[in-house]
Amino acid sequence: MNLIEERTIALAGLLQACGQVQTIARTGAADPAVEAACLKSIMVLDAMSTPAVYGGIQGVRTGLNMIADGVMSSPQGDKVEILRYAMSLIHLQNQLYLDSSAFNAFGQAVEQLSAVSSDELTQACSDLYQKFISEMRPQIIVQGEQNFLQREDIPPKIRTMLLAGIRSAVLWQQKDGGKFKLIWQRTRMQNAARDLLRQVTH
């Protein structure tokens, strides 16, 4: 697997996590398969490969479809909001990375999630996001239906998906991603996403 494909997978993970933020905020529910892949990405710290972070290429199928459909070059409608969340998370992750002590503390806190029971994992991820990310600027303001956003169970789910987005943003940076690569390599990543999707379907 080449570096462009690895970057594309990391970006797909980021985009689909942001897509789940939007879906939860608007409908009160997540896509179970995508949510599971996002959660897995938070917990897998020493993956053998980039696809393994998400349980295989199929774990980022939703994000790959977004890239293959041209979300990076001509986002339409709801995808503009998803892209805005994604760009904000890349910016926040970069801020965190530049503060080595905060980034190390963040990494240690993520490692401790492995000891948390599945019933308490969403709340633990939410708490971790609040502790390390929520106070950073620019603060991410999630748009959605107030009757869902005001429900007690919804904000922790949204913060958990935002944390999954941060995880993918870390992976994006580890694969030498950056804001300029989002612009200059978007066509190459679109083609890579299409190639990767063909691997899933065959």
Image (spheres, helix red, strand yellow):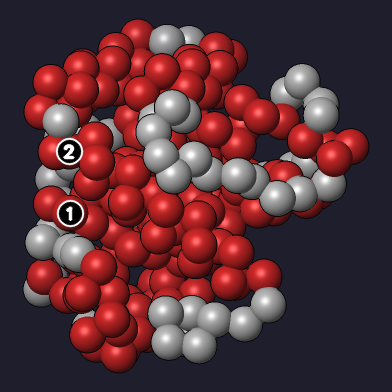
How packed mark 1 is, by other alpha carbons closer than 10 Å (few <14, some 14-19, many 20 or more), is: some
| Tag in front: 2 or 1 | 2
Q: Residues within 10 Å of mark 2 (few under 14, many from 20)?
A: some
Q: Is residue 186 above or below residue 104?
A: below
Mark closest to the chain's N terminus, 2 or 1 = 2
Q: Secondary structure at mark 1?
A: helix
Q: Residue at x 89, y 37 (%)?
A: 147
Q: Nearer the viewer, residue 86 or 2?
A: 86
User: What percent of the width, then of the height, locates residue 122?
Assistant: 55, 23
The answer to whether any part of residue 185 appears in the image is yes
User: Residue beneath label 2, please?
Assistant: 97
Three-letter code for the amino acid on which mark 1 is drawn = Gln
**Where residue 39 is drawn, which disc sits there?**
none
User: In the rendered structure, are the residues bearing label 2 and label 1 in contact, judged by CB atoms less than 8 Å apart?
Assistant: yes
Q: Is residue 178 left or right of residue 140?
A: left
77 left or right of 117? Answer: right
Task: Please tell me which residue is depicted at 41% across the width and 39% down the height of the picture.
Answer: 137
Please give the residue where the numbered disc 1 appears in the rendered image. Answer: 173
- Which amino acid is tagged 2? Tyr
